[in-house]
Amino acid sequence: MTQFADFSFKLLVIERLMYDDRTLTPAFDVRAHLLAQGLIEDDGDPAYAYTKKMGLSYQVLPVVRDYFDALEISPELLSSVEELMLDGGNRVYYHCSPVWDGEDDLYDVRSLDDLPLLPNLKWIRGADDFWPAELVDVLRERGIATGDW
């Protein structure tokens, strides 16, 4: 099983493979997952309501973190990743935290120890704008582009 050292980095990879490329299937849906776990009933916007009711606003829902922590991504899929994008509007963030506004560091990548898992990574869009210089320097040393689109 491929292990990621940084959960937020793994989420960037999941965004790419699950929601952009649609090669990591099935696509995770927080509402369906909460329904399947028996944590909500099917009415209105239950993922948002559940999050608020449980006092879990602005954090990753524990049942969702467990799901993504356990999610295996094959080496073949990992090798297909050539680009990642830093964007507070990534769909994976909504599914992890239905009540999150992108105004804090909840999904900040803190380690690039997972870079060897992506042997064909060529570009991380937005890294120049959102990551500290020491992380951007590591990317540039490895020949990974960091500019905007």
Image: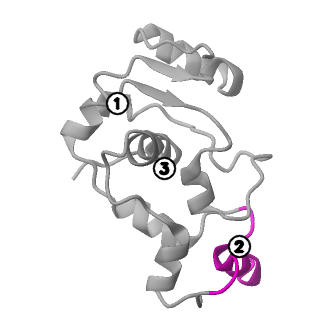
Q: If you read the primary sequence from the N terminus, does the residue marked by circle 1 or circle 3 appear first?
A: 3
Q: Quadrant of the C terminus?
A: top right
Q: Is residue 51 magenta?
A: yes
Q: If you read the primary sequence from the N terminus, does the residue marked by circle 2 or circle 3 appear first?
A: 3
The residue closer to the viewer here, 144 or 95, is: 95
Whether residues under marks 1 and 2 lie with C-beta atoms below 8 angstroms apart, the answer is no
Please name the colour scheme applied to the rendered image. one colour
Q: Marks 1 and 2, Cα distance to the nearest angstrom?
A: 31 Å
Q: Marks 2 and 3, Cα distance to the nearest angstrom?
A: 22 Å
Q: Give the range drawn in magenta.
A: 43-58
> Could you classify mark 3 by the number of other residues whose Cα lies within 10 Å: few (under 14), some (14-19), or many (20 or more)?
some
- What residue is pinned by disc 1? 81
The residue closer to the viewer here, 140 or 26, is: 26
Image depth: mark 2 or mark 3 in front = 2
> Could you classify mark 1 by the number of other residues whose Cα lies within 10 Å: few (under 14), some (14-19), or many (20 or more)?
some
Q: Is residue 77 magenta?
A: no
Is 133 displayed left or right of 26 in the figure? Answer: right
- Residue 51 x/y as whole percent: 69, 75
- What residue is pinned by disc 2? 48
Question: In the image, what residue occupies the spot 57% across and 17% down?
Answer: 136
Whether residues under marks 2 and 3 lie with C-beta atoms below 8 angstroms apart, the answer is no
Amino acid type at image mark 2: Tyr
Amino acid type at image mark 3: Phe
Q: Marks 1 and 3, Cα distance to the nearest angstrom?
A: 17 Å
Q: Is mark 2 on a helix, strand or loop?
A: helix
Q: In which quarter of the image is residue 42?
A: bottom right
Amino acid type at image mark 1: Val
- What residue is pinned by disc 3? 7
Q: If you read the primary sequence from the N terminus, does the residue marked by circle 1 or circle 2 appear first?
A: 2
> Could you classify mark 2 by the number of other residues whose Cα lies within 10 Å: few (under 14), some (14-19), or many (20 or more)?
some
Relative to 99, say whether 63 is above or below. below
- Residue 68 x/y as whole percent: 42, 60
